[in-house]
Image: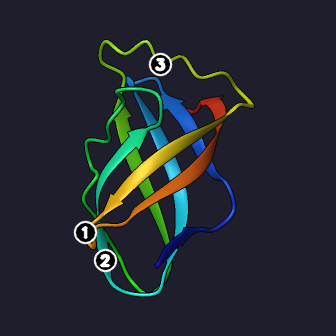
């Protein structure tokens, strides 16, 4: 079982991508296989990450590309994460703006 700890942070890096930093608690060893910002076509380019038992801090990178995703500071967005055991976990991230 994988659950989110607290609310994650979403920020924009001026190099041209959004980063989501999330703490996930896992009761077993499992991999993340996909990560999509809900309601958008934003998909993480580094979706495959390993989770071990306990708390795991992971960062997903979402290239901006031709996206019309335009987050507003202070707003909360949902990210849907697909796991290697077939489960899907939805997490919340708060957008903090640009971090260089």
Residue on which disc 1 sits? 84
Query: Is residue 73 positioned above or below 19 on the image?
Result: above
Residue 71: where, in percent of width, then height? Answer: 59, 22
Residue 28 vs residue 65: left or right?
A: right
Examine the image and state in which quarter residue 37 appears: top left
- Mark sitting earlier along the chain (1/3): 3
Given residues 1 and 7, the one toward you in this image is: 1
Crowd band around label 1 with a 10 angstrom C-alpha radius: few (<14), some (14–19), many (20+): some
Q: Residue at x 47, y 29 (%)?
A: 39
Q: Residue at x 32, y 36 (%)?
A: 43
Examine the image and state in which quarter residue 73 appears: top right
Residue on which disc 3 sits? 69
Query: Is residue 8 positioned above or below 87 on the image?
Result: above
Residue 20 vs residue 83: left or right?
A: right
Residue on which disc 2 sits? 30
Residue 45 vs residue 52: left or right?
A: left
Q: Are marks 1 and 2 in contact (CB under 8 Å)?
A: yes
Residues at marks 3 and 2, CA–CA distance in whole angstroms: 29 Å
Crowd band around label 2 with a 10 angstrom C-alpha radius: few (<14), some (14–19), many (20+): some
Q: Tag 2, which secondary structure?
A: strand
């Amino acid at each position: 079982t994988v659950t989110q700890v607290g609310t994650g942070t979403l920020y924009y890096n001026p190099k041209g991508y959004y980063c989501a930093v999330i703490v996930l608690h896992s009761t077993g060893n499992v991999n993340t296989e996909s990560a999509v910002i809900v309601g958008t076509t934003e998909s993480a380019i580094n979706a495959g990450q390993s989770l071990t038992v306990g708390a795991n801090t992971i960062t997903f990178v979402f290239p901006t590309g031709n996206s019309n995703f335009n987050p507003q500071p202070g707003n909360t967005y949902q990210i849907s994460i697909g796991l290697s055991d077939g489960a899907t976990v939805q997490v919340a991230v708060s957008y903090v703006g640009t971090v260089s």
